[in-house]
Amino acid sequence: MSGSVLFDAPGPRARRRILIANILGVVAVLALLAWVVKVLADFGQLDAAKWSSFAQSGTWENYLLPGLVNTLKSAAIAIIASLVFGLVFGMGRLAQNKLVNGVSSVIVEFFRAVPVLLMMIFFWIFFGRMGIVPSGDAPFVAVVLALTLYNGSVVAELVRSGVHGLPKGQREAGIAIGLTRGQSLRLIEIPQALVAMMPALLGQFVVILKDSALGAIINYNELLFSGRLVGTGNANVFQALVVVAAIFILINFALTYLAQWVSTRVARRRAKASATEDDGSDDIGLVMPEGPGITTPRK
Amino acid sequence: MDAYLSLWETYGGQMLSTFWTNLQLTFWAAIASFLLGTLLALMRISPVPSLRWAGAAYVNIFRNTPLTIILTFGVLVLFGVFRVTLASDFNLNFFRIAIIGLTIYHAAFFCEAIRSGVNTVPLGQAEAARAIGLSFLPAARIVILPQAFRGAIAPIGNVLIALIKNSTVATAGSVAEISGTMKVMMEFRPDVGIPIFLTVAVFFVIVVLPVGMLTTYLSKKLAVAR
């Protein structure tokens, strides 16, 4: 799509130029890779001994797999909790009642503006010191809570923009058959908005999974934390971080592909439902909500 | 109240100076990652397959890597293993390595933001540019990118806000910044834990909200009328 904006079928001269640029590009990429490999080899980072600890089952059984389980555990709980949080406060922001609306707005805007890491450090030390949770569980609770508050607020905005994106006729029809505004919101608008926001929602799950790695900073023994232990224990930090990053990238790739697949499904569904409605299914629209931070409601 | 005021006496200066570090990290990383992101976006929309592929590979890899890993990598690997030294001063070295880490990560998001702006430029603009004889780079520079940047202000603003908040993760790269200060304060004064958190949080709200409002305003004001 974006590729076709700037050029179309090139003529013979342009084709030759593109071919030359292409070859130069390949050479540049290969040269960069060769340089990286050379530096790695010079520092002895490609030696088999540096990598061998990842061929041992002990490394995986005692460190990486438990770490991965903890990462997935915190991410999964945070995903479910932020969905609930997002639905509650998203509906709060759509409420007629000024008080409910105002309180929801302040909460959502506040938690979107505060760095997740600050919340994690706060909950970690506060809960640990106050004895609200056993100090061993404090990092886990802090990770889940911080991820939930931030991402729940983003989901709340997704809910709000999803409902705003619906045709006005939906609510009018709901009211015409005698539903109250609240009933029409719950029974008619939210279910449709949820379908429309599915791709952005899956993108937000990628953010949750990535941000769960912040837990390593507050000593939650997730994947990055255990990877660092492996690396410092075997003097192969570089290799350990590469393996950990690769695991994160693979899981996120899978989620991103799922999001793209769902996005095309949703687009097709909505195109069938109405030809005039803005389907909002361009792949770029999908990219932004999975960005590193705040998403604005798309109108 | 007295407890809170004594907190400011003890830690006030440290809070402000470390928050200033966050703003500096944001400033340099924003400039560098915007430039790198523009280059990547150009690569991704160019007619040259190898450059398109390289740009897409970069974005897909770094967008899916946790920032914490990248910044940990900076201190444990770039400095710890490869002895990268960008400054003779220890702290300045970590500061600069952290800027590189933040840049590498956020360039991928700036690239996608700019590319989303390119998608708002109608096909006719590119066709018109070609019709008057401009080739790819002149067409991009004179016709496409100026409109694309104007269409991309809102997403660029979102990435900028994320960058401001993500500067706290530089603590994983051994930079003395505000989240580290907050941790120290929380450990020594848990009695005023909630006020400490709210104070530091307000620092960010004060910076983030105006940036959000400004980019929303600019994105409306500068929107290309079509």
Image (cartoon, rainbow, N blue to C red):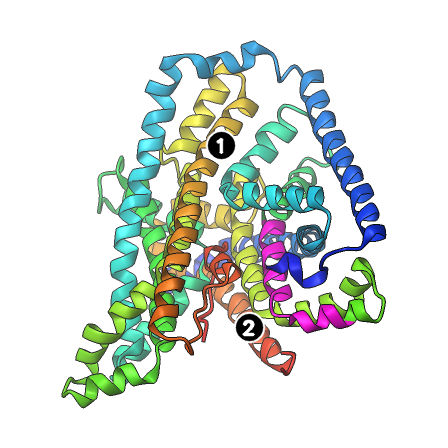
Q: Is residue B110 magenta?
A: yes
- Going 41% across and 75% down the picture, which residue do you hit? A275
Where does the magenta region start and end? B106-128
Up-down relation of residue A201 to residue A192 (above or below): above
Co-location on one chain, circles 2 and 1:
no
Q: Is residue A284 left or right of residue B44?
A: left
* Cα separation between marks 2 and 1: 37 Å
- Going 50% across and 63% down the picture, which residue do you hit? A282
Label annotation for residue A246: 1
Of the pair A150 and B6, the residue shown nearer to us: A150
Of the pair A83 and B18, the residue shown nearer to us: A83
Q: Quadrant of the C terminus of chain B?
A: bottom right
Three-letter amino acid code at disc 1? Ala
Up-down relation of residue A264 to residue A162 (above or below): above
- Position of residue A69 measured from the top left corner of the image (x, y, whole percent): 31, 32
Q: Is residue B188 visible?
A: no
Q: Is residue B131 visible?
A: yes
Q: Is residue A169 left or right of residue B217?
A: left
- Position of residue A177 measured from the top left corner of the image (x, y, whole percent): 15, 87
Three-letter amino acid code at disc 2? Pro
Q: Which residue is mark 2?
A: B210
Q: Quadrant of the N terminus of chain B?
A: bottom left
Extreme residue in the front direction: A12
Q: Quadrant of residue B61?
A: top right
- Going 47% across and 30% down the picture, which residue do you hit? A244
Chain bearing mark 2: B
Around disc 1, counting alpha carbons within 10 Å, would you say few (fewer than 14), some (14 to 19), or many (20 or more)?
some
Of the pair B198 and A99, the residue shown nearer to us: A99
Q: Quadrant of residue A40?
A: top right
Chain bearing mark 1: A
Up-down relation of residue B58 to residue A278 (above or below): above
